[in-house]
Amino acid sequence: MVMGVLAAQLASYAIWTSQVRSSRMAQLDELSSNVAYSVASTMQFFRSLPREYRHIVLDQLRNMGGTRFFVSVNEHRIGVADIGEGPEKTLVVDNFQRILTNELNIDEVLVEFSRPETLRVFNNEVLLTDLPPRWGQHSLLMEPLSPPILVVQLQLEPGTWLYVATLLPIAELFEPRAWLSGERLLAGLMVLLTVLGLSLLGIRSMTRPLSRLSRAARQLGDDLDASPLRETGPREVVATAVAFNRMQGRIREQVEERERLFSAISHDLKTPITRLRLRAEMLDDPLQRERFCASLDELDALVRGALASVKGLDLHERIVEVAPAALLEGLAAELRLHGGEVVIEGSASPIAAKPLALKRCLANLLENALFYGRRAEVRLEDAPDRLIITIHDRGPGIAEAQRERVFSPFVRLEPSRSRHTGGSGLGLGIARHIVRAHGGEIGLANHPEGGLVVTLTLPRQANVTDLQ
């Protein structure tokens, strides 16, 4: 927007400057031509006078005063400190030389410009400023201005030079003209600020609904029960808000349907599993009874794991400020009661999160670390924009090719992560889903000294309200 407004300002100013310059040159052309014809008439008049009458006429003109010209007849050409340059001077000089040459039918006409304070006007080269005011100062001086004086000299006859000095009524004829003056720069800046201010107000009014849509999109994974978006603003934004609200409603319905489905399945499966377990206990063959009961235990574990998965992916929990260190210390105390060794290092300020979901995520990771590595070393690294939690165990680690696969449901690696050793293969998948629901990520890597390192990264929000 700034570049566009500046380009428009510069283009309009360039056009305006070009027009002003063209108008100025046309005015100067007309003015210099008129003055040149007046000078030609004056010179024709003096050329027509007998030699003995010329000085009488000059004395009368000087005594009268008020004439546009200062005229003198000299025995030689008077030197003039010529000043000025540029197209303006070239135009004036060319007009005078062309008109005087044509009107007076002479070959040599000297046209020059001089400053008033350096102009000499007589044979004895008296300065203009030294003359009595009525002789020339009234016609050639415009105090406090000091415009250049045009001097025309031509030879009337051998030993006689006619000297004519006059003013062109343009005070700044040869003054350097800044392309961008301070006044014009100020005016352009005021226009620029006005346009940008009005544009900013308009853009903010149009983009405010987009900001609401952006916040709603960030909150969608955290709170499906959030209020629908207001369907206001420009037509395109209204259409987007309507589609977003419809999508949120459909996702909410699908999540609720999934929960009802899993609840119904778990309820329906528990009864036949219980009946089969009772019948298995009545088998006469001990080997068949043991195998049958083991299969039922495995099926029951799968059902409980599926239900745990649904609870772990629950999206209806509200977000509050959670103290990571305190949460980890509580989990470590519970695990130590079962013989687990958990060491926690570092500290961190509270973070906005779903407390039960985050606790389940960390519990799954710590239980895995203790089960396969017997010891868990936890380190907290706090930063203004994120929280990093690393969990290092002393287990066998995971091959690089298998690290993504272990996040899939019901996947356990053989032989160290066999189903017979316990677990349903849902812990890592649930942990990653919870972390991603908070806008973070979880990664796996083998430690150089042995064991698996789980790195959990959670972004910090500005406040809890941003996530609600």
Image: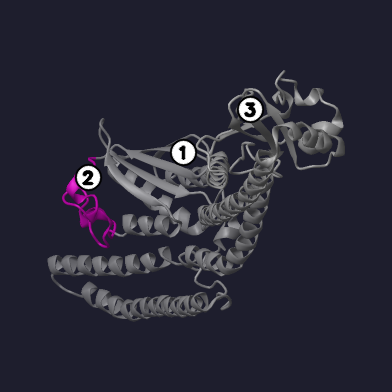
When the figure is inspected, residue 411 is found, relative to residue 241, above or below; the finding is: above
The numbered disc on residue 160 is 3
Give the spatial CA distance, label 1 vs label 2. Answer: 23 Å
* Most frequent secondary structure within the magenta stretch: loop
Note whether residue 33 is visible.
Answer: yes
When the figure is inspected, residue 351 is found, relative to residue 294, above or below; the finding is: above
Nearest to the eye among marks 3 and 1: give it. Answer: 3
Give the spatial CA distance, label 2 vs label 3. Answer: 115 Å
Residue flagged by tag 3: what amino acid is it?
Answer: Thr
Q: Which residue is labeled 2 in the image? A: 398
As rendered, which of 362 and 389 lies closer to the eye? 389
Q: Which residue is labeled 1 in the image? A: 380
Residue flagged by tag 2: what amino acid is it?
Answer: Ile
Which residue is at a point 51% across and 54% down the rendered structure image? 7
The numbered disc on residue 189 is none
Residue 394: give x, y in percent of width and height: 29, 37
As rendered, which of 123 and 418 lies closer to the eye? 123
- Residue numbers of the magenta segment: 396-425
Point out the tag, 3 or 1, that comes first from the N-terminus: 3
